[in-house]
Image (tube, helix red, strand yellow):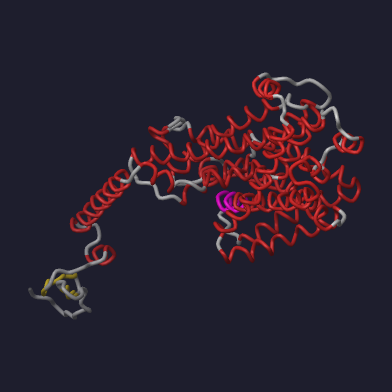
Amino acid sequence: MQTHSSRKSPTIGGKGGHELVFSQSSRQTYCVLLSKPARVTPMEIERETPGSDRGKSWRSNTAQDQDAKNLEESYQFIKEPAWKRFLAHIGPGFMVSLAYLDPGNLETDLQAGANHRYELLWVILIGLIFALIIQSLAANLGVVTGKHLAEICKSEYPRFVMICLWLLAELAVIAADIPEVIGTAFALKLLFHIPVWIGVLITGSSTLLLLGLQRYGVRKLEFVVSMLVFVMAACFFGELSIVKPPAKEVLKGLFIPKLKGDGATGDAIALLGALVMPHNLFLHSALVLSRKTPASVRGIKDACRFFLYESGFALFVALLINIAIISVSGTVCFGENLSVEDADRCSDLSLDNSSFLLKNVLGKSSSIVYGVALLASGQSSTITGTYAGQYIMQGFLDIKMKTWLRNLMTRCIAIAPSLVVSIIGGSNGAGRLIIIASMILSFELPFALIPLLKFSSSSSKMGPHKNSIY
């Protein structure tokens, strides 16, 4: 092969492979095969002969190799026992379910029981069934598309609509953080006997606590906090076994809808808002992306089914805990042998004065154990709210923010109304603010639910997996 004014470029290749030497002339470039099979990168092929048959062949072979790799991964995934595959998908549903045991949820449960006995239990049942359906849709959306809800909203909606949805989602995160601030302040009041407004200010330091504990791993932190929350749940189950509410009345409350008495409608709306939180839809669709799913119809279908099972089990546990809290509150506050002091507490039951409900189980230590569990409940909800806020901001605005900074931003905004209300209205005012925040979450829900239903019903995005129960 002859070249004019040629000069040799460095060889490409390595040990055990052919070497390529390029000779350059004034008109064209030639590639000379000297020896050994070459390992040439795609960039080098394109640089050598852009758009050539060789480049097309390489891309075709690469696509075939990727398809073969996906097929092999799917085969290996399906070969594993079903229980192992299910265990690999556990995590997102339980983390999201922590939001169903936050201080706002406890407050609305306690007031529903104290004001209406068992008559609003049906709201809990319907709310959690509804939560299971929409949480499974959110999980399916993430599994099938490989994107979470906020990212899809950004790519599908006009800029003005996208900004409005982002602001509403951020408002939901802040509204969900207000009960966590007040619940933590109530816990500090029970444990250290400090005023509520000082406790509200101290909650800002939970950002530093979160930052410090992250060094040990978020999973360990989630586990510890979850265990503390379930300690409180165990206490309510223990109290339930002692006060023994009439099973017939509890079942009637679960399956016969009623809205009788003063404030029943408002309490029902607050219960629903505390259960079905809009920011959880963004969170769940993002958390499932951390699990490896085979790129096949069977693999995706199995993953969606496993996430449904996990969410169903987690929400069933949350249902039992909420039923126990309402039943204990309703049984004690409507009891015949209620003391005058306890009757006064029941007339305006709030998170900071409800530890007496557990005195049959815990005795004099009821306020301490209740305070620790309430503190854990507030911190666990802080974790889920912080992650949800991160995904919302990242998806809508492409802004990645450190966890502690995101938590600090949300917490500072949530502290402002909590501080003002706790100074002016004291514990009673702070308790009412929790109910108002829960009602705001109810009215916020459609702005996250409508995009979710739209995208999960789209054939172009979901294919054969659109809006199906697996």
- Identify the residue at image location x=61%, y=40%: 161
* Percent position of residue 424, x then y: 91, 48
Horizontal arrangement in the rendering, residue 109 relative to residue 283 (left or right):
right
* Percent position of residue 4, x then y: 13, 77
- On screen, residue 397 above or below 137: below
Tell me if residue 405 is in the magenta stretch.
Answer: no
Tell me if residue 395 is in the magenta stretch.
Answer: yes
* Percent position of residue 61, x then y: 21, 53
Residues rendered magenta in the picture: 389-397
- On screen, residue 195 above or below 335: below
Q: How many marks?
A: 0
- Identify the residue at image location x=68%, y=37%: 444
Main SS of the magenta part reads helix
Horizontal arrangement in the rendering, residue 345 relative to residue 317 (left or right):
right
Horizontal arrangement in the rendering, residue 449 relative to residue 9 (left or right):
right
- Displayed quadrant of residue 272: top right
- Displayed quadrant of residue 166: top right
- Identify the residue at image location x=54%, y=36%: 452
Using the image as rendered, state which of residue 66 and residue 73 is in the foreground: 73
Q: Quadrant of the C terminus?
A: top left
Using the image as rendered, state which of residue 29 and residue 166 is in the foreground: 166
* Percent position of residue 350, x then y: 82, 41
- On screen, residue 147 above or below 312: below
Using the image as rendered, state which of residue 302 and residue 65 is in the foreground: 302
- Identify the residue at image location x=69%, y=27%: 121
Q: Residue furthest left?
A: 1
Horizontal arrangement in the rendering, residue 284 relative to residue 185 (left or right):
left
Q: Quadrant of the N terminus?
A: bottom left
